[in-house]
Amino acid sequence: MTDWITEWLQQNKAETDRLADTIFTHPETAGEETQSAAALENFLQKNGFSVSKNTAGLPTAFTAEKGSPSNDQLIIVS
C-alpha cells in the first residue's frame, strides 16, 4: 500500500474499530443493511471520500473513492 493509505488507516483505526463494532452489534438482514450502509457512507464522506450510492442499482450498495487515478487511489465498493 502507498504511504497515504497506510497513514489514513492508522489515523482512523479507533473510529473504524468503533464503526465495525456498531455494525456487528446491530445486524441487519442481507440486502436490507440500510443502517450499516448509511453509517459507512457517512464515515467515508466525513473522511474525504467521494461516495456514490445505489451502486449496480442496489439501494444499500455504494462506491467510495479517494485519491486520483493518475496517482494512488483507494476505491471501496460495498
Image (cartoon, rainbow, N blue to C red):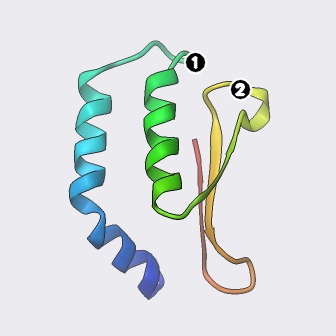
Which x, y percent locates residue 56?
78, 34
Cα gap from disc 1 to disc 2, whole angstroms? 8 Å
Which x, y percent locates residue 67?
62, 75
According to the picture, the residue beneath numbered tag 2 turns out to be 58
**Going 35% across and 68% down the picture, which residue do you hit?**
9
Q: Amino acid at mark 2?
A: Leu
- Along the line of sight, which residue is nearer the eye, 46 or 11? 46
Q: Amino acid at mark 1?
A: Gly
Looking at the image, is mark 1 or mark 2 earlier in the sequence? Answer: 1
Q: Quadrant of the C terminus?
A: top right
Outermost residue on the right side: it is 57
**Going 57% across and 18% down the picture, which residue do you hit?**
31
Hey, which quadrant is residue 73 in on the image?
bottom right
According to the picture, the residue beneath numbered tag 1 turns out to be 31
Dot 1 surroundings within 10 Å: few (below 14), some, or many (20 or more)? few
Tag 1–tag 2 contact (CB < 8 Å): yes
Which x, y percent locates residue 48?
53, 64
- Along the line of sight, which residue is nearer the eye, 47 or 61? 47
Hey, which quadrant is residue 39 in on the image?
top left
Dot 2 surroundings within 10 Å: few (below 14), some, or many (20 or more)? few
**Going 52% across and 43% down the picture, which residue do you hit?**
41
